[in-house]
Image (cartoon, helix red, strand yellow):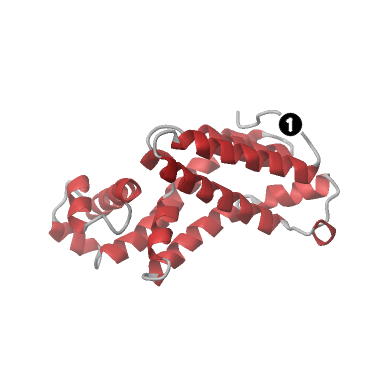
Amino acid sequence: MSTHKTKIRLLAAALQVIRARGYCATTVDDICEAAGVTKGSFFHHFKGKEDLAVSAADYWGETTSAFFAAAPYHTHADALDRLLGYIDFRQSILNGPLPEFTCLVGTMVQETFDSAPAIRDACERCISGHAVTLVPDIAQAMVDHGLDGATAGWTADSLALHTQAVLQGAFILAKARGEGGAQVAAESVAHLRRYVELLFGVHRGPKFA
């Protein structure tokens, strides 16, 4: 197995195990077992669990960026339809066991925001970096609908971050609910869609496909 493949296996294992157990409850041994590598291989690539977590946050950002870049909502000609399509798409992937649809960086930052600033900062880069991808469509939708940030009291950047706040909150609700968590998360995302429609004064059907 090449060095590169070993490191990727460790990162992929970290995504899987931390999303299922949480950062604090996950050990280096857990990650090595899930990756099928030795502890020596782990420490060849990472100084420790915190170092791995920072790299895992960056890896999560890279993999999810590719996933969302290929999503179907980008094909809509209208900017607001693309934004609503993004929200619909996020709702459509809220299925399966909790670890499969909740967010790695949202999970880690809740546990480490004060104790591990390097992890916190890596998670913030990932969440804010994803929010930035929504800004051009929101800004164009504002132009198309005659909305000015100064008079509206909000900006494309603030709305983009708000979408992430709702999504992360939806993941927390899902975890708190346990069984049926995906449903309560989906309902929160549906409210986000209604809110965006109210901001733009429209009512449109599903746009994720």
**Quadrant showing the C terminus:** top right
The residue located at (70%, 36%) in the rendering is: 81
The image shows residue 39 at horizontal and vertical percentages of: 14, 58
Q: Image check: 68 left or right of 27?
A: right
The image shows residue 203 at horizontal and vertical percentages of: 76, 33
Q: How many numbered markers are drawn? A: 1
At label 1, the amino acid type is Arg
Q: Name the residue under label 1.
A: 204
Q: Residue 129 appears in which quarter of the rendering?
A: bottom right
Q: Residue 85 appears in which quarter of the rendering?
A: top right
Furthest residue in direction front, as rendered: 177
Q: Image check: 157 left or right of 21?
A: right
Q: Image check: 180 left or right of 51?
A: right
The residue located at (33%, 60%) in the rendering is: 53
Vertical placement of 173 versus 182: above or below? below
Q: What element carries label 1?
A: loop
The image shows residue 120 at horizontal and vertical percentages of: 43, 65
Q: Image check: 42 left or right of 19?
A: left
Front position in the image: 149 or 20: 20
The image shows residue 18 at horizontal and vertical percentages of: 32, 51
Local crowd size for mark 1, using a 10 Å CA cut-off: few (<14), some (14–19), many (≥20): few
Front position in the image: 59 or 201: 201
Front position in the image: 67 or 16: 16
The residue located at (44%, 48%) in the rendering is: 103
